[in-house]
Amino acid sequence: METSNHPKIIEQLNTYHPGMNLSEQYQYVRNYSVEICEPLQREDYVVQPVVDVSPPKWHLAHCTWFWEEFILAKYQHGYTRFHPRYSFLFNSYYNAVGDRVLRLHRGNMSRPTVDEILAYRLYVDQHMMEFLKTIPDEVKELVELGLNHEQQHQELLVTDIKYILGHNPLFSTYRTDFQETSLNETDHAFLDIKEDIYTIGYSGSGFSFDNEHRQHKMYLNNFSIRKSLVTNGEYLQFIEAGGYHNPQYWHTDGWTWVQEHKIDAPLYWYLMDGKWNRYAMSGLESIDPLEPVTHVSFYEAYAFAEWKKMRLPTEFEWEAASTHLDWGKRWEHTNSAYLPYPGFAKADGAIGEYNGKFMINQMVLRGASVVTPTGHSRNTYRNFFQPNLRWQFTGIRLCKK
Amino acid sequence: METSNHPKIIEQLNTYHPGMNLSEQYQYVRNYSVEICEPLQREDYVVQPVVDVSPPKWHLAHCTWFWEEFILAKYQHGYTRFHPRYSFLFNSYYNAVGDRVLRLHRGNMSRPTVDEILAYRLYVDQHMMEFLKTIPDEVKELVELGLNHEQQHQELLVTDIKYILGHNPLFSTYRTDFQETSLNETDHAFLDIKEDIYTIGYSGSGFSFDNEHRQHKMYLNNFSIRKSLVTNGEYLQFIEAGGYHNPQYWHTDGWTWVQEHKIDAPLYWYLMDGKWNRYAMSGLESIDPLEPVTHVSFYEAYAFAEWKKMRLPTEFEWEAASTHLDWGKRWEHTNSAYLPYPGFAKADGAIGEYNGKFMINQMVLRGASVVTPTGHSRNTYRNFFQPNLRWQFTGIRLCKK
Amino acid sequence: METSNHPKIIEQLNTYHPGMNLSEQYQYVRNYSVEICEPLQREDYVVQPVVDVSPPKWHLAHCTWFWEEFILAKYQHGYTRFHPRYSFLFNSYYNAVGDRVLRLHRGNMSRPTVDEILAYRLYVDQHMMEFLKTIPDEVKELVELGLNHEQQHQELLVTDIKYILGHNPLFSTYRTDFQETSLNETDHAFLDIKEDIYTIGYSGSGFSFDNEHRQHKMYLNNFSIRKSLVTNGEYLQFIEAGGYHNPQYWHTDGWTWVQEHKIDAPLYWYLMDGKWNRYAMSGLESIDPLEPVTHVSFYEAYAFAEWKKMRLPTEFEWEAASTHLDWGKRWEHTNSAYLPYPGFAKADGAIGEYNGKFMINQMVLRGASVVTPTGHSRNTYRNFFQPNLRWQFTGIRLCKK
Amino acid sequence: METSNHPKIIEQLNTYHPGMNLSEQYQYVRNYSVEICEPLQREDYVVQPVVDVSPPKWHLAHCTWFWEEFILAKYQHGYTRFHPRYSFLFNSYYNAVGDRVLRLHRGNMSRPTVDEILAYRLYVDQHMMEFLKTIPDEVKELVELGLNHEQQHQELLVTDIKYILGHNPLFSTYRTDFQETSLNETDHAFLDIKEDIYTIGYSGSGFSFDNEHRQHKMYLNNFSIRKSLVTNGEYLQFIEAGGYHNPQYWHTDGWTWVQEHKIDAPLYWYLMDGKWNRYAMSGLESIDPLEPVTHVSFYEAYAFAEWKKMRLPTEFEWEAASTHLDWGKRWEHTNSAYLPYPGFAKADGAIGEYNGKFMINQMVLRGASVVTPTGHSRNTYRNFFQPNLRWQFTGIRLCKK
């Protein structure tokens, strides 16, 4: 298994490493969620400006609910839930567990307060730390899933905070020392990968998600893949060449999306006095042409590649080439739909809902981003979003035949 | 002019009286807005669960914006605005003043924070107190308008807080000592009012809104009006008689509304274990059959009256009868559309937008409610809402010919 | 009672006169519905381009359904309905009569065909003619209602046909000899009407709708009303003065409507090569500045009057002045909401739904239009529409105090 | 290349065979479009009950527009278009060709009439027949594309007519002799296909679409595929087992779709007096348990397979197994997203829009249906629809590993 060797920008907040024992891992992961929110004002925890962005306090509570619902309530004898209504309030998608607050309405809920949710976290953490001392072997895998689940929400916490601050006319700063980009993209050479049968999917002994299983063979043709990500400068050329105004580069659905939402630049780009600026977590800044273009949808990535007379890689090509790439800065769009691997099997019970039920209408992204928790991703990791979404730290890698 | 002699439940918070001088009035009114929010958690200030309900922190800021925009920026020489973007953020409807944040998006704005808004209030109050010392005579009327504007928002603050807490599954309490009803409705006798020419509209020397002018003559036929408001017990009979399932009692638009939103009871009524409860600002309580039914829309008030084979009064009938009524507990639905009086004239400039531009698609409510600031209403006061809205403390008074 | 003395343009098609006996009236009215459709192609009978416009074949069937449902099925002993499903298909709003096809879906129904509907008409007409020979006295009023109901649909037939042809890029002609305007509007003088008690509402012995009852007294102040309708030329000045781009002239709801629908001229006006044309039933024509402006909504009429620093009359002012006016060319917007007169009472049963249930969210129009069937209107007649609708032959008459 | 050997039910209407010369093929294909519409009433040609269903007269005109726009206007010297506005009216998706009438509004267009469209067809056919006599070699491929394009619309014509008649409460018959199913599904055995490298995609010399190119290698694991399609009887068991009420079988998006649209059975199934009936083109009939279940969406096919603890085949598995299957009765859902094959290249110009721009948000269906024109499909043919659509003659084939 190959993991990203790209240095994490927010490493200082994130000292998790897989060598820790389960209790240490639990504490680190749980603390990191709270640390991410540390620069927030109380008001920032509450809002949900669009349906895909959840209030930070909801993330803090929902991750806690996962531990309470799937571990403590099931395996800790005599456990009393912190609050009888929280199970209803903080379920996200798990239909099998019972009713849930509509995703749409999370931002209408001022209660429970942040303090109440922090008390909920404390209560659950104390019980979990106790439980982990004598954890039965058969529950360990579920704890690992819980840690990875919380890490997924940590990335969402950062991207949702960015959305909340970046869509407010005051453009407040998250942390002035937060660097979204460490290195420029300069090596535009292409790697040639040879036609062959490749092995795809996870087969190691560490944690992995069900959607990375089972390892299987794929026949790939010759292809070439670019070492660098597409830069702001290159993307600006696409804009200036009228890319957003020419339907020939776009999928029909992408073109409808561009026109309905009057899209004319990546998310967080603002044209001010004739110059492009972008909101970053350190504040409003002018566009740096050498940085990787970020916060583009699949539709935009596809249209850009069409304009370049190139294409996006499939997720299988990406995985086959990954050991040669410096990945980990941006989630990289692929031209693969999110579908089950041959022999994919869902787990029993509510946990079985984890991935399989999303395997329609979404596209796969590969790699990791600057805000992915260290150690969370790997070169077999399959991230997935609808083709119009842009609020993750996404980027574009070109491919040609 | 007749004012409500109904004792205010939240009198203790509300010691405003018209005998004060302008500076005293200003201080009292301004303080009262903050006092209303005193029981809130910081999170409660932020949310906007439906478009008609504004976040409490928005109300606090918007009222302040009114003083800054219409008084200080215009009449205080050399005044510097507290923040260059607030004028954009806290404009509500005043199209003539410039762009504004869409009402729909107020609940997406975590910044400015409550603390920043309180600092904004302090800054504006200091300048206003200075300004009021030497206020030119021609600005006094505008200050009175500002005070009445803030009082209108004080009532909205209470009703919006009720909506925020009352639509959260945790049903938190605002104040346990908050009484929504002081007296039962028991005297169901009807007053007979004689056919005659009546004088309608305000003609006194105190403050009044432009929509109460000009006083004019109306020819009214004989009618009878009930002394008591319709009670919860009476309304329950309507529910149990299938009132919400029989189109014959409803306007076509009302029937569509009932079916689309699956309405089957007043707002805040919840059927639990076969018994009706209602959320009050002191918490969840069982229905008291002798209290006035509250939080009903015009559509419901009309349908109830149809079912009773009676009708709602017109606003003119209400005004003619008002000196005989114990009004002031609930805003009372009338069967009058909100339209200009003969000779109605709008003020010049942005202030001219105050009332006239809403004179379409709304119905008039008369009286005052338990949460109307003392001294704010009078028997010529014209309140107005769309016929489907229910979050105000509305009630039903029956009329027959 | 005063009726319009304005010569009908389509008089030739419309030889109805009140002196006929009931059978003659029935035949004339029924024939006229079919004559209106005579210039149509079969395809034109089917479509419903917006929800307010019904397919012509639906009108032909619905009017027939009225006779079958309210007369034959009730009063003709042993009557067999033409088709068991038509009662469901051609009910419009009469909730008390049973389920009905949603208004929204009328244009999806290719069957029954026009021929089948004409057979349905024939069948019902034969039974009606038989029935009318020995009609009981107590049913005569209902027959008169049925005739007036069909006349209302005759006007809608014409306006709906205009919409269907006028919103198709081929701009087909209805009849080349169809004149929408006979006389120019030239006398812009104002009539002065004196403050007094006026009598409003119908009290004659002919047919009238329930909404015109009961006659009652109204106190009106002095006002002045213009003899001529507002012309295209005057309206063009409003457009050229930026009337559609300045919120100060508009109701809030009107301004929202203008912006959402990008309204910038009356319905059927098309700017071609820098010149305004309008679709008329005789084809596409350039704007004649002396004709009355037509197909404007209440919102536009109000904004135009604001821009002129005048106002629209109330429906009571209009009625008081009507004997002095040459009305009948256009339905004239008033600033009165559609509400019951004092003592208004609904009829029993489904017929009781006729008018009362629409008495919310609509504004009154007075007069008659070039396509109102002769004899159908009178100076107490109350027409009503939502304030955004424009497909009727509406016009503007100015008032000032 | 393998083609369906399933006898076509509507063979009698469809005597096309590939041995004909181009002129003969053109005449047969063009005539067949008109023949499909022969049982229609004029009114049936006009309506568009949902956005995916186009009016039959639109299909007749749009196919004609293709010949005029892509052949005659380009290659026939001095050709004069039949009507200057038709190019605008009958463009479907070809953004590169110019503006087009929104798909949503096709059903609002009563003009041109059916007769006018038939005249348009005649005019274009006469010019095409002349043109085909001396057709340059390089245009022949485009003519073949035009024939296949019209055949695609012939299938849509039938399915759209079924939708129009089957969603009208009168349930009119298309043709009483129209059989939707010729043979029962009885052989539920599974074929075992061995793990190997398979060749996927078209490589023959006949016509094929760009999306079937280029032929390439795929590594497939062992799998088993059922000989018969899923039957109505089996599907009824799924319904009776609560399949539509249990989220565990559904994709999240599928579950949302089921709940929003209250789906509880295949399209055209109606529960009448406790018994399931279905609308077929020969009229309303009771469900035959041995017929293949039809008119199910991808969401339903997936949920059914989950409930059976099996799965749908991928399109590659289907193609590898196809020579062993009796396909051609129903379009068979696969669990493959519609994506480009390796090396896929779009044609230049507007024709390049044919397939590539739809390669997002759609799933592949393989095979052919009872209403696919003879000779139109083959075992490499890739049909595609959004996962919620049901109006095509779709079916379910099960797979297991």
Image (spheres, coloured by chain):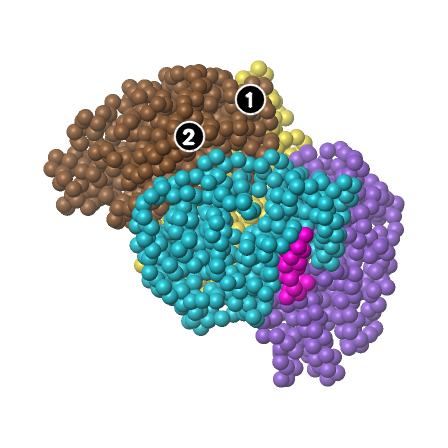
Chain colours: A purple, B cyan, C brown, D yellow
Q: Residue at x 84, y 48 (%)?
A: A227
Q: Position of residue B141 (x, y in %)?
A: 62, 43
**Where does the magenta region start and end?**
B23-47
Q: Is residue C4 above or below residue A342?
A: above
Asked if the magenta segment contains residue D207, the reply would be no
Give the quadrant of residue D41. Answer: top left
Residue D333 in view, yes or no: no
What type is the residue that disc 2 sits on?
Asn
In percent of width and height, residue D359 lies at 63, 44
Q: Chain of mark 2?
A: C
Q: Give the residue drawn at x 77%, y 43%.
A: B79
Q: Which residue is mark 1?
A: C237
Name the chain letter of the residue that bears numbered label 1.
Answer: C
Q: C25 or B179, which is in the foreground?
A: B179
Q: CA distance from mark 2 to mark 1?
A: 29 Å
Within 10 Å of the Cα at label 2, are there few (<14), some (14-19), or many (20+) other Cα atoms?
some
Q: Which mark is residue B351?
A: none
Classify mark 2: helix, strand or loop.
Answer: loop
Magenta-highlighted stretch: main secondary structure? helix
Q: Residue C81 in the image: x percent, y percent?
A: 22, 44
Question: Which residue is denoted by mark 2 in the rendering?
Answer: C222
Image position of B195 with respect to C179: above or below: below
User: In this rendering, is residue A65 above or below C161?
Assistant: below
Mark yes or no: residue C399 visible. yes
Which numbered disc flags the more N-terminal residue, 2 or 1? Answer: 2
Asked whether, in this view, residue D32 is left or right of residue A200, the answer is left
Tell me which amino acid carries mark 1: Gln
Same chain under badges 2 and 1? The reply is yes
Q: Residue at x 34, y 39 (%)?
A: C111
Front residue of this view, candidates B127 and D125? B127
Q: Quadrant of residue D371?
A: top left
